[in-house]
Amino acid sequence: MPGLLRDYFVVLPDSVAGHAVAGQLPVPDTTRTAGGAGGTVTVAHPSGRPWVVARPLVRKVSHLRRGDDALVLIGPDQVPGAVLAGLLEGARDRAGLERRLTRLPGLHHVIAHLSGETWIRGTASGLRRIYHARHAEAGTIASDRPAVLAHLTGAPLDDGALALRMLDFLPHPLSRRVLWRGVHETGAGYGLALPAAAPGTAAAPGPREYRWWEPPLPELPLAEGARRLGDAVAASVRAHIGGLDRISCELSGGLDSTTLTFAARATGPAELSLLTVAARDRYSEDETWARRAVEVARGGQTDTPALAHHIIPADQAPYFYADLAATSAELNDEPLPVAPGRARAHLLLSRAHATGSRYHLTGYGGDELFLGLPHAYQDLFHGNPLTAWNHLSGLRHQLGWPLLPTLKALLNRSTFPRWLAGAVTTEPQPVTRTPLLSWGVRQSLRPWFTDHANALITEEFRAAAAGQAEPIDRWRGRHVDIDAVRMGARHFQAMEDIGMTIGLPVAAPFYDDRVLEATLAVCLADRISPWRYKPLLVEAMRGVVPDALLARTTKDHMSSDEHQGLREHAPDLADLWTGSRLADHGLVDARRLLRLAAEPFSPVLVEHSISSTVAGETWLRTAENAWNPPDRTPTTSEASR
């Protein structure tokens, strides 16, 4: 049975029907993971009925009850009972508990019962999300996995949401559109409150969302912001790998992975394995910088961990679109554009697992956080127009932006709903010299989309705009920055799920809420610059990463591997479009896709990426076959601490 979830939790109401739902939960396919790990942790209501049922494979469940109040944290590390007690005791309401939770790295799902109300939230970065649905008998149930709720409620797939996922990325708030009807996502930065039924009544009020997170003001100078960021990165790394003896890191040679390599080294593991995938492009600099980092890390010191550097030869690294059938091994929450690169990710994680690693760190999230998007200059222009124009002029000359269009974009004051209404078009993609200073990037509908798909997509955008959608933040740059981080966090889920398939936990410490907050708190003029590469990260890592490695100012890309993959795996793509499930849903023209598979260097594929369509096709096949027939098993229980 493909795509069975291996890791999830549900939150259930205190009722006979809620107890019955616990017996209908899908069984994780732990037999297909290394070691066959897994199990069930049940935290009970005071009545003894199941409240939180978790089936974690790599995450840890920490829980504590004090009278009618209770707290459950699900994250990378086991939180000691004394720490849980310090969080729960004295917290009279949600706000009081949230203030105490800032002492921990921002990596946990939080489930609490205070003052007669259950509330649940994920992370502000979007790395951990919350979904909810209404069960016919039990009422509202919540989970971190929408597929679990779809399974329990019999929810059908939503063609509108599926059509949206064929775009390269979904801007806020459309990214919250769940793939199953009747299943809803709680927005990142928001929590879900589940009020209890009033005495003498059978039905509980419906769920409501509340905002628990606000981005900090950008007012810290670089030195103070760098100190806070360095502390947050170190704490996040410790939360994942602290105390483990054998760990691994992806050392691409870029600044982000190099930073985490040295942060991991500082935790003192007995063995540290570093993995680098060699590039086919002879002009690539990544491998050179990776070798340099290893040389510096060894540096003749005797008190450092045993360090092994594994370089995967370029000819062993799969091209994109290799082994597409293997994507059925994981049922992601949604189609993710990174799916065509699964074979490459699987190879690297498999090699890391073969070293005996117990946890693998990656630098995902670093680009979204530290590169700085041009949209931020809109924000800087309001408070410091001369500095903004000075910085923007440097960026404009680097990117070739014409003067008048840049000025026009900078002075544009379109509202977010107005931008959203026109954010998707049948026109060609904007050229590279188009200034990017709006609420996001305008996208083009693909030539192989059907009229039905185009109508669904445009209606989704129109409806969101007509509903007066609110931006994440009133400032454009902060809105785009946070939306980019949350988009990247969604994509990283694919890496986590591949790791669970292999039996190796995978982490991206940069998606920690404390790292996000420390970054956003720095003055814009210090955080981004056209003349410095990731200045905030560089300053934050001084004293941890040697200066010689912080000097890198370039970044490699793998676009050639993607284009070559279209040629190498043309037969696989042709097989994919033969009997296409997206075509059965009326969303793509399978005949046109078959012709494009035979013409991998077609100008159409140069102008329009096909990766999201491939991801949608492979995800749909997995989702439609995931539970047939549904599994029904009794739940087990473990006593609450």
Image (spheres, grey):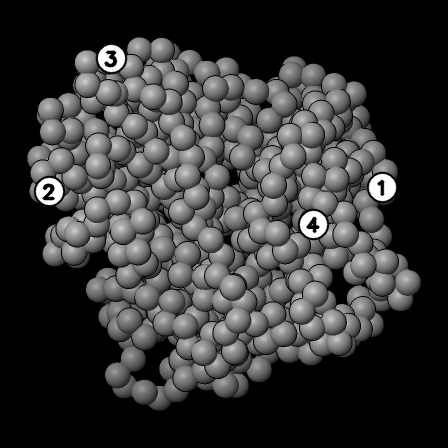
Q: In this view, does 490 lie to the left or right of 444?
A: left
Residue 123 visible somewhere in the drawing: yes
Tag 2 residue: 66
Tag 3 residue: 202
Question: Tag 4: Cα neighbours inside 10 Å, few (<14), some, or many (≥20)?
Answer: many
Question: Mark 4 against mark 3, which lies toward the viewer?
Answer: 3
Q: Is mark 4 on a helix, strand or loop?
A: loop
Amino acid type for the residue under numbered disc 2: Arg
Q: Distance between the residues labelled 2 and 1?
A: 60 Å
Question: Tag 3: Cα neighbours inside 10 Å, few (<14), some, or many (≥20)?
Answer: few
Residue 387 in percent (x, y) is at 71, 76
Marks 4 and 1 close (CB-CB < 8 Å): no
Give the mark, 4 or 1, whose residue is nearer the N terminus: 1
Q: Distance between the residues labelled 2 and 3?
A: 26 Å
Give the mark, 2 or 1, whose residue is nearer the N terminus: 2
Q: Distance between the residues labelled 4 and 3?
A: 46 Å
Tag 1 residue: 428
Question: Mark 4 against mark 1, which lies toward the viewer?
Answer: 4
